[in-house]
Image: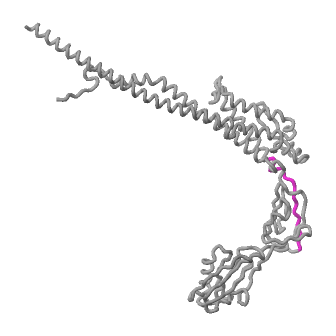
Amino acid sequence: MATITSAGIGSGLNVTELVSQLVAAERAPTDNRLNALESTTKAQISAFGSIKAALSGLESTLNKLNGDGSLPGRKATVPDTAGFTATAGATASLGSYSIIVEKLATAQKLQSAAAASTTQIGYGTLTLQVGTGDAFDVVIDSGKGTLADIRDAINTQAAGKGVTATLVRGDAGDVLVLGSSKLGTGGALTITASGGDGGLSVLATTGGTMTQITPAQNAEVSVDGITRTYSGNSLTDLIDGVTLNLTKAKPGEAFTLSVESDASTLKASMLGFISAYNTALGALRTQSAPGGEGKVAGPLSGDAAPRAIMQQLRNAVGGSYADLSALGLKTAVDGSLSLDGSKFDTAIAANPLAVKNLLGDNAEFGKSVREILHNVVGDQGLLADRSKSLDARMKSVTRQRADLDARMERLETAYRRQFTALDAMMAQMQSTSSYIAQQLGSLKTG
């Protein structure tokens, strides 16, 4: 008959607890080392992530100063009653223009004669064309020839082709209204009818009863006596760098458009650069803080990389400090920047190219800072290399944990085997001891 055994029964030892304690004691030093390494590595990954985000933000603000972004903006001023609005880009020339909106561009709208809602206008085929575009057919079935039916057929069969149909119900009956979606004379509608009972011919633009509500008309604008016609009401190439949006025709009435320099957008870009620069320095300083005297050390304390980046940026600023100062920039003891707004405005008024000459993509200081940032946050830069190194360390920790788990599993198996053997031996010894004691007892009684 098989016997049931359990570790510890023979010896009285708590083998399971004893094995667990021995394995835990063996595991603890390596486990503690890996936990510390993992915690430190995660903190460093997060720290470099914060630095990269801050430096990428600085790089973005510099990119806004590329090209015309480092030039003062332009402000277009127009009287409220001018019949047009205007916006000016950085390339617009300073000056003023006398502008007359003679006509607005309009899309053609036609309407039919009124008819009762039940009147069958006819059936057959309506052929429609928008300007010089491709003609398309709309088939009107027999018994489906009311103005409402025709409206539905046009909207269904001509959907997306530049014609819309609506129905207006007046005192005299229903009126079919057809509108072109294209502004200007190039959007004029042509309608012909064919086949069927001939009743649809009343809707033809030639020989029918359709009347024009709104003409297909081009915009007409006069700039300093120079006339320009256009098929729309937004003109982007009338005056270099200026966009005009026509809102109301005012024939014969001239209004002045003034294009002036506007340094406010450039100042905003400069303030953005300064803020991003200070944020980057702050991130570098915080993450590499040495600690001591009650202060908490940063995750990258002792790491030379943040200090090197910070020093490069401060050296670049120091090398161009005279030019920066002339623009109104000042440095604090900790290296952070600030801007004297009044001094900046004065400098830009005197030299609109001042920012471009300093921070533009081809300027010495601008190129220097961009190169530093590229070497740090670029795909092949310093932070990418450090990120790869830290990722490799995390993978190594994972592998070491797996190896530790396997080794501890083997160790636990070995301990259990040893204590099981010990338990069996002690059980046997206890059995022998009991037998001897029994024999000695019997001798005494004999």
Taking the image as shown, residue 371 lies to the left or right of residue 44, namely: right
Figure check: 171 above or below 283: below
Task: Check the picture and name the quadrant holding the C terminus.
Answer: top left
Decide which of 121, 126 is in the foreground and name it: 126
Q: Is residue 384 left or right of residue 405?
A: right
Depth check: 12 or 360 in front?
Answer: 360
* Residue 330, percent from left and from top: 82, 36
Q: Is residue 340 visible?
A: no
Q: Is residue 414 magenta?
A: no
How many numbered discs? Answer: 0
- Identify which residue, 38 or 269, lies in the foreground: 38
Observer able to see residue 185: yes
Res 224 → quadrant: bottom right
Residue 261 painted magenta: yes
Question: Image point 26% across, 17% down: which residue?
Answer: 426
Q: Position of residue 320 (x, y in %)?
A: 84, 36
Q: Position of residue 430 (x, y in %)?
A: 22, 16
Question: From which residue to which does the magenta span run?
Answer: 252-267
